[in-house]
Amino acid sequence: MSDIYATPVADLRHNDQSSLVGGNIDDAIAGNIEISMLGTMAEAWRDLSGFKLPCHLAFLLYFAALILVSLISLPIVAGAILIGADQASAATISMVVQSLGNIALIPLFFAIHLLGMRHAERKSVSASSIFGYFHKLPTLFLCYIIMVLLITLGSLLLVLPGIYLMIAYVFAMVLVIEKDMTAWRALETSRKAITRKWFPMFGLLLLIMLINMLGILTLTIAWIWTIPWSALTMSMVYTRLFGAEAQTLAD
């Protein structure tokens, strides 16, 4: 007889691993996969040729979409003012419209990981493919809300739990897109797998952040290399942990 009072548990097993390229969820959660973060960065650097342009184009498309969202809010705010809304109300309307627009663009940003996964496996890469995941938006939005709430709660309580979750959930949104997981399953899969690699992952993210911050000293010229390098590194780490599905690499 099932216990109706038992705490809900996400089934983190991946049923079909035969078509995976790279790691797999079960081994990642069990801590059976060894990854050299610095070694992966070095490999990503060597493999950077041919990835810089599509990566930058994908980011340009993403930021162009963000600008478009901002522009859409302008006539809405102007219309609100014309019908008598005060400045404070107009500012609130603008903030709400832009926030909703930014949320709607979540699939674009995290789909860039899939470009890196494809490039690492010598598959064709198209920047415009990041627009193909809007159907995942409801799950991504739910994942985002739960993640923000838990990280915020952890930060308010003791700070350190919030920092732990911020790193542990690093691949949750990608798991939703790439493996079609539910929000909670993606969060738990990422958390359990990254917990086994928490300090190396923290070090990798810190190093990536520092490298891109130093790129500002070159008037962002170095970003031509550092941004695609960072994206490809994270994509390769993801593949080595969780594997890339056949549909992700399909031409």
Image: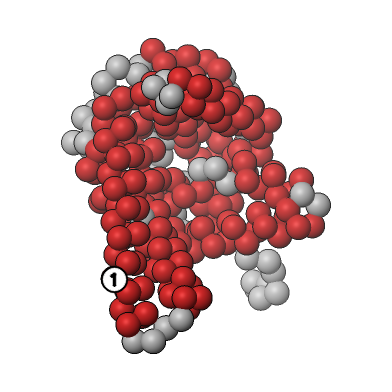
From this viewpoint, which residue is outermost toward the right?
158
Q: Is residue 43 above or below residue 223?
A: above
Residue situated furthest bottom in the rendering: 84
Colour pattern of the rendering? secondary structure
Looking at the picture, how far across and down is residue 111, in whole percent? 35, 44
Image check: 217 left or right of 125? right
Residue 168 in the image: above or below residue 10: above
Tell me: 119 left or right of 141: left
- Which quadrant would the C terminus be assigned to in this image? top left
Residues 37 and 50: in front is 50
Horizontally, residue 23 falls left or right of residue 67, namely right
The image shows residue 180 at horizontal and vertical percentages of: 39, 53
Q: Is residue 83 above or below residue 152?
A: below
Residue 250 placement: quadrant: top left
Q: Residue at x 42, y 26 (%)?
A: 220
**Residue 19 placed where, x, y %?**
33, 37
Residue 34 vertical position relative to residue 24 in the rendered view, above or below:
above
Task: Judge from the rendering whether residue 172 lies leftward or rightward of residue 222; answer left or right.
Answer: right
Which residue appears at 28% of the width and 56% of the height?
Answer: 68
Pick the quarter of the image with the N terminus.
Answer: bottom right
Q: Position of residue 42 (x, y in %)?
A: 47, 14
Q: Amino acid at mark 1?
A: Pro
For the residue pair 16 and 60, the one nearer the viewer reads as: 60
**Residue lying at 32% horizontally and 53% vertically, measured from the top left:** 67
Name the residue beneath numbered marker 1.
75
Q: Nearer the viewer, residue 41 or 6?
A: 41
Q: Secondary structure at mark 1?
A: helix
| Quadrant of res 156 | bottom right
Residue at image point 39% right, 22% down: 221
